[in-house]
Amino acid sequence: MLNSIRPKNRVIFAYLLIPVAIYVFAVFVPLVTAGYYSFFEWQGGPNKSFIGIENFKTLMNDEIFWMSFQHNIFLVVACIIGQIGLALLFVLMINSRLVKFKSIHRTFGFFPSTIAAVAIGFIWTMVFDYRRGILNWILELIGQQEHTKVWLNEPDLVMLLIAIPLIWQFIGYFMIILLSAISSIDKSIIEVSEIDGANAIQRAIYIIIPLIKNTLLVCVTLCVAGNMKAFDHIFVMTTGGPGNASMVMALYGYKVSFMQQNMGYGSAISIGIFVLSLLVIGVFQLGTKLLSSDKEVV
Amino acid sequence: MKTIQTKLLAIFLNVTLGIFSLSCIFPLVWMFYSSLKQKRDFNANIMGLPKNPSFENYVRILTNADYRIFESVLNSIRTTVLSIVLIIFLGFIVGYILSRVRFRGNRILYVMFLMGLLIPIHSLLVPIYVVFRATNLGNKWFTLIIPYVAFGLPIAIFLVEGYVKSIPVSLEEAANIDGSSFTSTLFRIILPICKPILVTIGIIQTFATWNEFSFALVLIRDQRLQTVPLAMTQFTGQFSSDYTKIMAAMLITMSPIIVFYFVFSKQIIKGMVAGAIKG
């Protein structure tokens, strides 16, 4: 830009002041605050006592916290496989000439991802409900009464059941992203492969998937970031229960801080969540970078 | 032989996708016709269509001011609209300045906002409560707008920044020669050009803001200030497990965003995808 049209410094300052202030206040100030209070024993009241790194020592040995972390990772993996996997499968199907009502599939499929996770949580609580649940209703309909149960009270099943609504909600979202990637592929490439006699499955594996690899990696990144912050629908469906069988990190931090009034330790957990989430996202980003760069060489 | 195979394949593909699409829309349909039932009717058969459909649940919810349904919808609309306007307006200004104006600190600000895309904001849940309580900004009508704008700004800034780069600088130079000031060039020339990307930002952030739950949960205590997702979590308790009534309440509070989606679904789908890929 020419220097003659560059605005004066105070004009720039005036324009930037409010957005930067809001941003710093809501993002960086809380981070620093969490760092500060994590060194204190603090119930949220006027009294607090400095205890050094005691909170972090507790955190390192806190089985519930590490279990929550594992649950987050479980959700990430389940959603990468379930969401992106199913989305890819559906997208390959939708691209077939044999499929009708494509725009309806798009509009309906995308719909759940626009609904509040709280509402999704409620809907799926109704699916798994014991007396009035859809799942038990279906089991009774097909004469399998003995298999009906209070689904969300099963510690071994609960994580899987929690993952289903999460996967289901965003399949449509990833479908749309992948569809737009596929539609940007040069049609002639696919036509030539058809002439050469490649069937639909070969086309998918050898042509379409390699060509949309970078978009797939973007989807993985979105999936990771989305699931490290799982909170809303678990809060509604189980609040982390039974016991802590479906606890995730953000929910655990919330419970320690607001239910047990342990704000000092809650701050330490927040720092733990911050570091671990950043680490996991970083590792996945690095992985996707490596995978996507070797494509450019080819 | 070939045609039978193709036919079977066509049936398989259409049925599979049909089931998926149906599963996406069925909960809404089910909630709607169930909300027209009475409790006893629903408990007798959860899937059956209502025998005597009536809007009694709706009437009872809407006429009882204690439930604060209208208030929570209004709170959500106000919070969402104000947040979106601020995100678009501030994001546009910052994005433009970071892209075009050279000044000391430009890169620092750029990196700072870039970090906003990486910072796992859910780790701020507890500390943000501490900060808002200490500064006495919690539990006010405007409380939620602050974090929503802050969390929405980074993505807005980067979408604008990338978009402005594609606009030729000669446009601004010409405006300058014609005597247009920085501010008037910004709003009268650049702003209209950026409209498509600003619409995209608006769409992404509308859903993010409208549906946001966890920060509302920790920052809002007063029932009169609650947003829709917060109100939803209370229906189960308020209506003592009267499921048909809960569903009616859910649908009432969801209606603005459902209407918004089905009216603008094409643009919304396009906008969300554009935002996701560039972000």
Image (spheres, coloured by chain):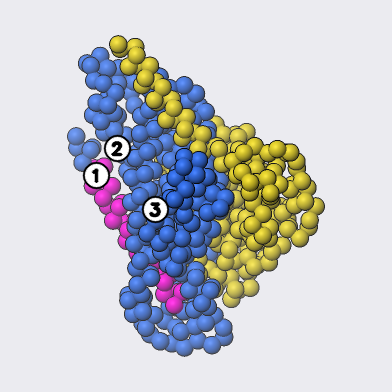
Magenta segment, which residues? A265-293
Residue B69 pos. (x, y %): 72, 54
Q: Is residue A282 magenta?
A: yes
Query: What residue is drawn where x is 50% and y is 23%?
Result: A101
Three-letter amino acid code of the residue under disc 2: Lys
Residue B2 pos. (x, y %): 30, 12
**Chain of the residue that carries numbered disc 2 in the rendered image:** A
Three-letter amino acid code of the residue under disc 3: Leu
Distance in Å between CA atoms under marks 2 and 3: 28 Å
Q: Which residue is mark 2?
A: A213
Would you say the magenta stretch is mainly helix, strand or loop?
helix
Residue closest to the far left: A298
**Chain of the residue that carries numbered disc 3 in the rendered image:** A
In the rendered structure, the answer to whether residue B57 lies left or right of residue B15 reads: right
Query: What residue is drawn where x is 61% and y is 43%?
Result: B45
Q: Which chain is blue?
A: A
Residue B226 visible at all:
no
**Chain of the residue that carries numbered disc 1 in the rendered image:** A
Quadrant that contains the N terminus of chain B: top left
Q: Residues within 10 Å of mark 3 (few under 14, many from 20)?
A: some
Q: In this rendered view, identify the residue nearer to me: B276 or A107.
A: A107
SS at mark 3 in the image = helix
Chain B drawing hue = yellow
